[in-house]
């Protein structure tokens, strides 16, 4: 896209930009969502044409979905978001048809191939893929969105553009107070670089004064994870597995044992991982450790950026009894909440952009080429994320969404990602793995389903 088609630039925050720099390691940094829809009644034009008309009507209100990346001059700052003044919807919407019989395995193989491809940085960083030919007559829509947009208006805008609470009835507008745009948009790249240098002494003094408390808390909280097949270098191929469990069962388990729904999710994943590794004779004696994302966003903060960090959560996989494991995980997450409360003010979501496109991308390439994730001590074995979704069924271009499976990211050293999302009366499970690290991630979905029945059996016994 030419310079004449770009306007209104503003820099990414350091955390947003980090998801751009990490792609230099050869791992695409977009997240996805696989929606399964009822059989559409789109007429002779087909569902894609109907969806395109739906998007053309809604997209003008989604400014975040019209932004493109623009590098800063001479790499003096983080990349900037530039508003595209010309936009071609056909570059973001594609259709493919599965060959017969249109099985779930064929669908997931197609999604895995799409998910492994980086998004084109010369365009706004999102794409929709309509997949037809499913055996049940339904349609799948796979959405991809770069993580640099995810925690801000991009993810919210995409949902509001696409989805309705009833056919033709949009999701109600966000009621949180509007926040002004980042003031960085009116500051030149050179001025930001100068400001970063001038502010460095103050930043270092503040960090030095906070260091004793920070070090004490880190010493008590940081764990080293045991080596597993998941702590591997990531290649170009992906595998994906999906499944669903009833939310009523998870709530019953949580209420019976006096733990949170997130504790139940972590325990279910821990049980599935323990079973999987036992089958492969690879279960470590020490507990597996999950990297668990948590939000740093203040209530009512509508700033369009990422404000997230990661906590370590012990999955207590060394404990054989599922109820004892669940209670041990609940104790672990209570300590995590306390630690996050103490450390929240010290966790940065931004860092100076001076030459960051050079040094941050360079570090990512060194990390990948040196296979350092396989050589250095591991801080986690996988990522597990629990995402709240819609409590009611939603509709896409007038067609009911039956399920909405999250499809997230794997990186070097973390070749397995389990993300779950509540949707209506179910918990939809999306598992992404490196193609070689986990050859049958569907075993983990079955393990989660089995873990639910095991805990319910403990209640009823």
Image: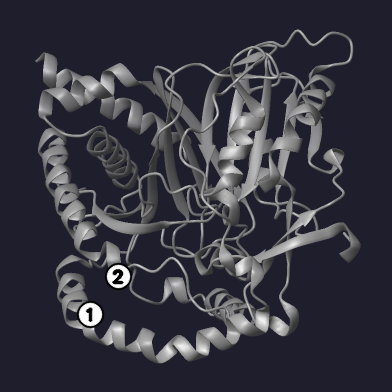
Secondary structure beneath label 1: helix
Q: Residue at x 69, y 37 (%)?
A: 110
Q: Position of residue 104 (x, y in %)?
A: 61, 25
**429, 386: nearer the viewer:** 386
Dot 1 alpha-carbon crowd within 10 angstroms: few under 14, some 14 to 19, many 20 or more: few
Q: Residue at x 60, y 65 (%)?
A: 12
* CB under 8 Å between discs 1 and 2: yes
Left or right: residue 177 compared with residue 278? right
User: In the rendered view, how is the structure colored?
Assistant: one colour
**Is residue 354 in sight in this rendering?**
no
User: The C terminus is located in which quarter?
Assistant: top left
Q: Position of residue 241 (x, y in %)?
A: 51, 35
**Residue position for label 1:** 210
User: The N terminus is located in which quarter?
Assistant: bottom right
Q: Position of residue 382 (x, y in %)?
A: 39, 54
Q: Position of residue 271 (x, y in %)?
A: 26, 38
**303, 91: nearer the viewer:** 303
Q: Residue at x 16, y 50 (%)?
A: 332
**Residue position for label 2:** 346
Per the model, the C-alpha gap separating discs 1 and 2 is 8 Å
Secondary structure beneath label 2: helix
């Amino acid at each position: 896209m030419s310079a004449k088609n770009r306007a209104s630039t503003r820099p990414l925050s350091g955390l947003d930009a980090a998801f751009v720099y990490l792609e230099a390691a050869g791992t695409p940094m977009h997240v996805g969502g696989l929606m399964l829809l009822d059989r559409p009644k789109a007429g002779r034009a087909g569902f894609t044409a109907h969806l395109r008309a739906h998007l053309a009507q809604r997209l003008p209100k989604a400014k975040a979905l019209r932004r493109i990346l623009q590098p800063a001059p001479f790499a003096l700052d983080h990349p900037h978001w530039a508003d595209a003044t010309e936009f071609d919807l056909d570059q973001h919407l594609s259709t493919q048809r599965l060959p017969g019989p249109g099985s779930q395995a064929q669908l997931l193989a197609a999604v895995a191939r799409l998910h492994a491809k980086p998004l084109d940085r010369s365009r706004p960083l999102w794409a929709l893929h309509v997949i037809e030919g499913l055996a049940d007559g339904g349609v799948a829509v796979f959405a991809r969105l770069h993580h640099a947009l995810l925690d801000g208006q991009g993810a919210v805008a995409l949902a509001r553009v696409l989805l309705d609470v009833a056919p033709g009835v949009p999701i109600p507008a966000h009621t949180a107070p509007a926040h002004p745009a980042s003031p960085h948009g009116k500051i030149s790249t050179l001025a930001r670089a100068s400001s970063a240098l001038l502010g460095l002494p103050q930043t270092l003094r503040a960090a030095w004064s906070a260091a004793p408390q920070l070090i004490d808390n880190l010493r008590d909280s940081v764990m080293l994870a045991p080596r597993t097949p998941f702590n591997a270098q990531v290649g170009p191929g992906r595998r994906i597995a999906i499944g669903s469990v009833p939310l009523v069962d998870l709530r019953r388990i949580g209420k019976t044992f006096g733990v949170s729904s997130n504790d139940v999710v972590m325990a279910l994943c821990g049980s599935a991982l323990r079973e999987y590794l036992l089958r492969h004779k690879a279960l470590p004696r020490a507990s597996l450790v999950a990297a668990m994302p948590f939000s740093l966003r203040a209530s009512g903060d509508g700033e369009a950026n990422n404000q997230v960090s990661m906590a370590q959560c012990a999955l207590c996989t060394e404990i054989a009894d599922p109820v004892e494991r669940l209670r041990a995980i609940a104790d672990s997450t209570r300590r995590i909440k306390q630690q996050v409360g103490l450390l929240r003010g010290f966790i940065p979501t931004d860092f100076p952009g001076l030459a960051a496109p050079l040094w941050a991308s360079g570090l990512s390439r060194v990390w990948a080429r040196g296979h350092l994730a396989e050589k250095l001590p591991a801080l986690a074995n996988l990522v597990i994320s629990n995402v709240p979704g819609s409590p009611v069924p939603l509709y896409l271009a007038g067609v009911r969404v039956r399920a909405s499976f999250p499809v997230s990211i794997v990186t070097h050293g973390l070749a397995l990602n389990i993300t779950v999302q509540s949707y209506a009366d179910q918990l939809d499970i999306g598992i992404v793995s490196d193609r070689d690290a986990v050859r049958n991630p569907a075993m983990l979905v079955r393990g989660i389903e089995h873990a639910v029945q095991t805990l319910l059996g403990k209640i009823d016994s």
